[in-house]
Image (tube, rainbow, N blue to C red):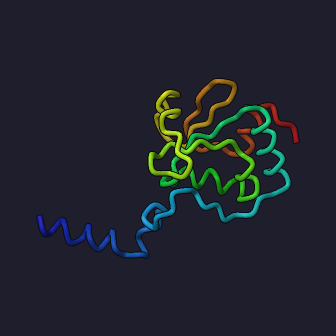
Amino acid sequence: MKRLLIPLLVLLTSPSFVHSSHLNNQRELIVTSESTRESIELAKYLKDNGVVKYSAYWCPNCLNQSELFGRQAYSELNVVECARDGINSQTQLCIDKKIKGFPTWEINGKLILGILSLNELSKLTGFKN
């Protein structure tokens, strides 16, 4: 038992291994990349057309998806936080929608699980740049 516990403690306390925002009491995704004009236009189009991204602040795939948009465009998206302890959590909505993983996109009533490129999102939603 000790042989397992010591490496686990080292892993959890080492800053070079742990990058999850929830370990630093951040309860929301922090997007740091810059947006392009195109990603901002796409995000606005998605919002105006009722597209929703279901997400959890501790989810690395959610962060990767958000970084594709950049911080300015990300702020335009309809994002539902599913983690119970996340900022502005809407856990019950996620349960009601039967969200099984993150990120999940809701496009025209259809749920699509996984990271989607901006090009894929454009094609799925009819966005023309």
Which quadrant of the figure has residue 110?
top right
**Most foreground residue, 55 or 91:** 91
Q: Residue furthest right?
A: 129
Which quadrant of the figure has residue 71?
bottom right
Q: Position of residue 129 (x, y in %)?
A: 88, 42
Name the residue rendered at 68%, 45% in the picture: 117
Q: Position of residue 55 (x, y in %)?
A: 55, 45
Q: Is residue 111 left or right of residue 118?
A: left
Q: Residue furthest top?
A: 109
Q: Position of residue 68 (x, y in %)?
A: 68, 54
Q: Is residue 61 left or right of residue 35?
A: left
In the rendered image, the quadrant that contains the N terminus is bottom left
Q: Position of residue 37 (x, y in %)?
A: 85, 55
Q: How many marks?
A: 0
Name the residue rendered at 76%, 57% in the picture: 72
Which quadrant of the figure has residue 8?
bottom left
Whether residue 124 is situated above or below residue 129 in the rendered picture: above
Name the residue rendered at 42%, 75% in the picture: 15
